[in-house]
Image: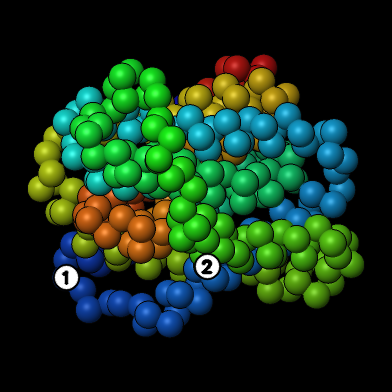
Amino acid sequence: MSEIIIQNLLSPVVLFFVLGIMASLFKSNLKFPDGLSEGLSIYLLIAIGLKGGIELSHYSIESVIGPIFGTLFLGVIIPLMTLIILRLMKMDLKNSIGLAATYGSISIVTYGAAITFLEKSGTTYEGFMNALVVLMESPAILVSLLLLNIIEKNRDIPEISYQSMKFIPASAKLIDKEVIKESIFGKSILLLLGSLFIGLVLGERAVPTVKPLFIDLYNSVLILFLLNMGLIAGKRLPEVKKHGFKLLLFGLGAPLLFGSLGVFVGSLAHLSLGGSTLMGVLAGSASYIAAPAALKTSVPEANPSIYLGLSLGVTFPFNLVIGIPVYYEIAQWIVF
């Protein structure tokens, strides 16, 4: 296990992330232009979607139905678990919803780093896993915001409890068009779904066109993105410390809990060692792109320094350094 963690620590993507954190903590004047930061995010979303669509075109629906159901299950259960845990920790409703959406959704870059880790270790994985990234991005946002919508429409329900879940008044408006629009047609989901669909329709015909930019250069662009993420994470770390030890503990414990659950679900869906590891990474990661974009519009009262600071300043580096190797070890124990 220690050798795997050291190997992951010495990878270029992790080292450049650490360089970004150091630059931020030491008040360096290094910064990325806003346009470049946005462009790198768009590139990663398109690249993952295209690769997922192309790979998915090689499989029949029968071979992917189990993993698809497993992914949707995780996308629903993780935000519910997060909400319950945080409410037991006495966190207010709006910030609990913010973290439920964030931790139920996924980190594209953590997933990309996990793929690099598997490739370096010579571990194969199912090509359709890239498609599952898209499926898991949206359900958690929808579930979290719909839960908030239900509670807000019924002000007399102050806490999450058995009594509050026992019935939902007929007057409750369960579906909000703006919530659905933000969750499905937001930038991240739109790019992932659109790129996935294009890759699925074109299949191998798309490879000669997309390979030079979106496949060959992927790991190099990921390094640039992680350098920028390190700069941002370094600024967010002090904000997390302001909110107490319990929140910090959640940021470290949640990925292990949800990641282990993801590996277990992946094994039940008959995924390989690499596939189960990636399922664990999806479940154990936290979003700092799609979920915050939805929360900014739908739950403006939620504090970005909490959900962004925790996901980007604590869970993201934890997964990058320790989480990915741990999920791999758990998958080795469960799958073999």
* Residue name at image x 72 percent, y 53 percent: 52
- Is label 1 in a helix, a strand or a loop? loop
- The residue under label 2 is 187
Vertical comparison of 54 with 260: above or below:
below
Separation of residues labelled 2 and 1 (CA atoms): 31 Å
- The x, y position of residue 216, in whole percent, is 69, 67
Check the image and tell me how it is coloured: rainbow
* Residue name at image x 43 percent, y 35 percent: 170
Residue 27 disc label: 1
- The x, y position of residue 35, in whole percent, is 43, 82
Residue 66 disc label: none
Q: Is residue 124 left or right of residue 320?
A: right
Q: Disc 1 marks which amino acid?
A: Lys
Does any portion of residue 156 appear in the rendered image? Answer: yes
- Is label 2 in a helix, a strand or a loop? helix
Q: Disc 2 marks which amino acid?
A: Lys
In the image, 96 versus 269, the foreground residue is 96
- The x, y position of residue 234, in whole percent, is 24, 59
Q: Is residue 71 left or right of residue 127?
A: left
Does any portion of residue 226 appear in the rendered image? Answer: no
Q: Is residue 246 left or right of residue 152?
A: left
Within the image, what quadrant is residue 271 found in?
Answer: top right
Mark 2, residues whose alpha carbon is within 10 Å: few (<14), some, or many (≥20)? some
- The x, y position of residue 310, in whole percent, is 28, 47
* Residue name at image x 77 percent, y 36 percent: 64
